[in-house]
Image (cartoon, helix red, strand yellow):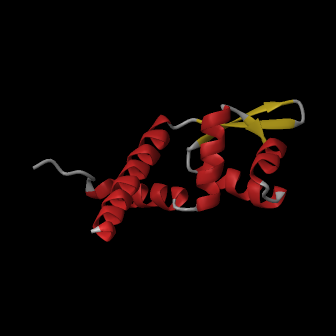
Amino acid sequence: MKELIPDALLEHVARRFRVLGDASRLAIVRFLLTRGEANVGEVVDALAMSQANVSKHLRTLLDAGVLTRRQEGTSAFYSVSDDSVEQVCSIVCDRIQTQARRELRSLAR
């Protein structure tokens, strides 16, 4: 049987899940996946979050390698740099929706 996560990577994988395990950060990632690229002000406006909170979450996502940052004059633009993030989110969302449908069907009986 193939080892899914080698011992040497367990902490790195756990760290990535912790980064993605925050609803605000997931909202930012979802917005950037949809938008493609945005600066802090655009994220603030779109998500109705404070500038300080958005900046903190963008830094966390940037440090984790989930986002990339492009400087243009005095503005910084962020975009999702890790293609696997969209795939992971899609897998998890699909699974949650499947479980919810099963639960609803069992309650209807």
Asked whether residue 72 appears in the rendered view, the answer is yes
Question: Which residue, as the protein is rendered here, is positioned at the far front?
Answer: 109
Q: How many marks?
A: 0
Quarter placement of the C terminus: bottom left
- The front one of 75 and 42 is 42
The structure residue drawn at horizontal position 39% and vertical position 57%, both measured from the top left corner, is: 96
Q: Is residue 62 visible?
A: no
> Measuring 48% from the left and 40% from the top, which residue is drawn there?
86
Say above or below: 76 vs 89. above
In the image: residue 50, left or right of residue 31: right
Q: Give the quadrant of residue 107.
A: bottom left
* x, y percent for residue 32: 65, 39
Depth check, front residue: 10 or 47: 47
Can you give x and y, in whole percent of width and height, for residue 4 in the image? 23, 51
Residue at 32 percent across and 67 percent down: it is 108
Q: Is residue 92 above or below residue 107?
A: above
Q: Residue at (48%, 35%) from the top-left corner?
A: 83
- 41 or 99, which is in the foreground? 99
Q: Quadrant of residue 75?
A: top right
Location of residue 4 with respect to 11 vertically, above or below: above
